[in-house]
Amino acid sequence: MPPKPAPIKAFILCPVIKQPLSFKTRSREAQLEEAEGLALAIELEIAGKQIVNLEKISPATYIGSGAVEEFQGLFKSLDIEIVIFDCSLSPVQQRNLERKWNVKIIDRTGLILEIFADRARTAEGRLQVELATLQYRRGRLVRAWSHLERQRGGFGFTGGPGESQIELDRRMIDERITKIKKELEQTVRTRRLQRSARERIPYPVVALVGYTDAGKSTLFNVLTKADVFAKDLLFATLDPTMRTIKLPSGQEVILSDTVGFISDLPTTLIAAFRATLEEVISADLILHVRDINHEDSEFQRQDVESVLFELGLEQTKHDGHIVEVWNKIDLLTDEDRSIAENKLQLHTDSLAISAITGEGLDKLKKIIDDKLAEDRKTFDVTLPSHAGELLAWCYRYGAVHHREDNNSEIHLNLRLPKHLLPKFWERYRQLNR
């Protein structure tokens, strides 16, 4: 068995542009920590990391010439192979820095794309990532670095077998983009057919969304008793997963776990994953899972809402379609927990939970029940005793609150989703024909 290759040594630079004192920004330390988490997600060895304060952006190298000279010696002494910029670089900036430092440069977009390439498991997920990657690389037609081939596969940002031997020109990229788009269009059509089939079943769909590493998959596993990959890792979930769960009322719903969002999520990725994210658009209820213990929790909330806005969900926040789930309360100090509980008094569509300890999960299920119930109608109906098939349908798709059996009749107090009422009455009329 060949020896395991040594990990690639990387250095992280987090450029921060000077802002007025009155301008509230993310924690710089939290930004740097997130960038490190992204790098660790593809198993790079972090040899160092540093915040770089900037007065302005240099068109040629992003950071100033003095900083470029300073880091050149540092990177050489540490044998750095990859430098990660926690920002978006232009192709010119990336090329100039690579020539100056003789290392591979990856910006935030390239790093996120590399993670997605590593995480995607389904054919659809791989196509979506490849599409976004090709669109990103189209303006950066540079040969991958052959000395990085010893690392695992990917799309060439950190090297991959064969990538250094393949240089795609724009024509070849455009042809591949066209082909992928056609394949994804077929996926969209298939997904719509599946959604139509679900609507005929149907179960309400509850979608989990949130910033990456907010605990969505852990919550999903607890609620569904599933075994979805859940780890303290950025983008642990990429391909959507669905399971049915039963609520306290007896109502069954489909719970959907989706890809995590992140600040400065590449627009190409949002566009590429639109077919997947349509599950969120069409959901009956959205649970926005937040890591309430994170120091940048409020900024993360804004990032998630920004993506939802791009998906066309800006109106839903005002009609009770979104419930904020403040996760990880078990990690809060007593003081911070008291502050959070006071804030919850002002947020009627929010609640605090811990997916790890189970605190608040019963309340969460009840809120899901209540929210979905707002779209249901409760009524009394009398069925003939021979209506066994319709009775079973009522139990399957509705909630029977009370049942009374007489000699030839069954009296029900029944609650059904409003969109199922026409189906019920159609079946009911058929009994009397």
Image: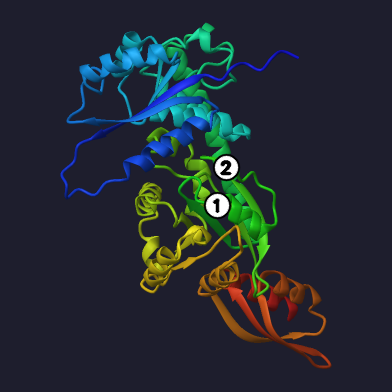
- Left-right relation of 423 to 138: right
Location of residue 263 in the rendering, given as x and y in whole percent from the top left corner:
38, 42
Question: Label 1 amino acid?
Answer: Lys
Image vertical order of residue 105 relative to residue 256, above or below = above
For this orientation, the residue located farthest to the bottom is 406
Location of residue 312 in the rendering, given as x and y in whole percent from the top left corner:
38, 51
Count all numbered tags in the image, as a single digit: 2
The part of the image, by quadrant, that contains residue 110 is top left
User: Nearer the N terminus, badge 2 or badge 1?
Assistant: 1
Dot 1 crowding, Cα within 10 Å, few <14, some 14–19, many 20+: many
Image vertical order of residue 29 relative to residue 358, above or below = above
Secondary element at image label 1: helix
Secondary element at image label 2: loop
Q: Could you tell me how far apart the alpha carbons at marks 2 and 1 are, in whole angstroms?
A: 9 Å
Location of residue 426 in the rendering, given as x and y in whole percent from the top left corner:
65, 73
Location of residue 211 in the rendering, given as x and y in whole percent from the top left corner:
45, 48
Q: Are marks 2 and 1 in contact (CB under 8 Å)?
A: yes
Residue 344 seen anywhere in this rendered image of the structure: yes
Q: Residue at x 63, y 51 (%)?
A: 242
Q: Which residue is mark 2?
A: 237
Q: Which residue is mark 1?
A: 216
- Left-right relation of 62 to 325: left
Dot 2 crowding, Cα within 10 Å, few <14, some 14–19, many 20+: many
The part of the image, by quadrant, that contains residue 184 is top right
